[in-house]
Image (cartoon, rainbow, N blue to C red):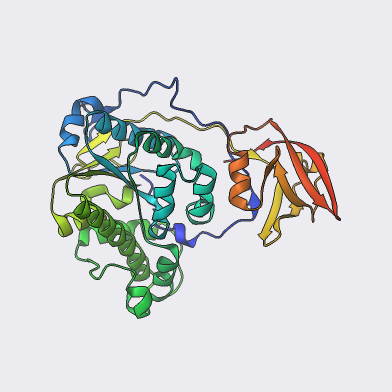
Amino acid sequence: MRFRLLRWLLPVGLLLLAGACKEMGLVGHSPPPYTVVTPEGRVVGTLDAILPELARKRVVYVGETHSKYGHHLLQLAVIRGLHERGVDLAIGMEFFQQPFQRWLDDYLAGRIDEDELLEKTEWFERWRFDYRLYRPILRYAREQGIPLVALNVPREVTEEVSKRGLSGLSPQVRARLPAQIDRSDTAYRERLRKVYDQHAHRGEGRFERFLDVQYSWDEGMAEQVARYLARHPGRHMVVLAGSGHVAWGSGIPARVARRIGGDYAIVLPADGERKPGMADYLIVTEDEMLSPRPLMGVFIDTGAEGIRITGVSRGSGAEKAGLREGDRLISVNGRPVASYAQLRARLMDHVPGDRVKITIERDGRVLEKTLELGAAEE
């Protein structure tokens, strides 16, 4: 199991590993039976067999390793199974931050398209995982009219928590977090300590700051779940979050229950850690993979004037097409690009080896180039 606990420490790279390819779509794709197993690996049934039980739960938490496509297909299978059984559902999502809820509403209502959703929610700056991993879930929700709920705490808040700790926050920043931050689960603290110790750290008190960030995420997401369900008393929710936020009930589930009570179930993929009590159901997923992301082979900078190329990788499609440092990108296949999010969206449905038409501005002249996309190394 992979816990997303140190993502806030990662630097932002400038190399454009642009776009992505045609995802493994829903059409023509038969989902696996999804075998339910015990921590010891004993088969006890299938997802279809446990769906009636899940349908009785107010909240169903389905964990994930963010980069594993098979985990997201399992999440979709749970959502689809409950929806088809007539459960009035909402989907709570860790991967969107709370201030961007209006754009999820607009996407669901058809007021904005997928490209605008990615740009308005600042997906590539705030989450960064390949959007294609989550795309089938978002599209299914839109097709079926299932409400989407942004759960995560704004990055600006957790960055302040990381720098200053909860006790050092200004009143304005502290007010953006729940009033109560529960630290009483000592077993959870010890599990987090083991994860923390796997990485190199500097400075006194860093583990306590690390805990402060994790607890801020947990409590912030739990409060969003509880608020939404309190406003919609007849509705259930499927919560999609990193397995570390839901396993054992310690992260989000117990904190939601503290606020509104109610029954819940935890579903985890069975390809990670397996211990009795960590989930209600462990489910075997297939190791499905997305095709490699296509690579333009350019470094970029973005600003008021749009996208400027600041470097070209040697031997790349960009170099072979004659792109240069200083060129300003105007369009891809005739579609304008003025931001990083737009460029990623324009390339999302291409695969390595595809040839795309790039329009650039160089020294006041508009030029067209044909570029063959390479493959990013994952």
Relative to 205, 37 lies left or right: left
Residue 139 higher or lower than 107, as above or below = above
Q: Is residue 215 above or below residue 339?
A: below
Can residue 316 be seen in the rendering of this structure? Answer: no
Residue at left offset 48%, top offset 62%: 9
Indicate whether 33 appears above or below 219: above
Screen quadrant of the C terminus:
top right
Q: Nearer the viewer, residue 228 or 62?
A: 228
Q: Residue at x 39, y 28 (%)?
A: 286
Indicate the position of residue 104 as horizontal and vertical percent values: 41, 49
Whole-percent x, y for residue 316 in the image: 75, 41
Q: Residue at x 40, y 33 (%)?
A: 70
Could you tell whether 117 is left or right of 246 in the image?
A: right
The picture quadrant where one finds residue 372 is top right
Which residue corresponds to the image point at 44% horizontal and 45% vertical from the top-left? 107
Question: Percent from the top left, x then y, of residue 38?
Answer: 21, 33
Query: Is 115 positioned to the left or the right of 173 in the image?
Result: right
Q: Is residue 202 visible?
A: yes
Whole-percent x and y of residue 239?
29, 46
Which quadrant holds residue 279?
A: top left
Q: Is residue 129 above or below residue 71?
A: below
* In-front residue for pair 282/77: 77
Q: Quadrant where the N terminus lies?
A: top left
Decide if residue 341 is on the left or right side of residue 38: right
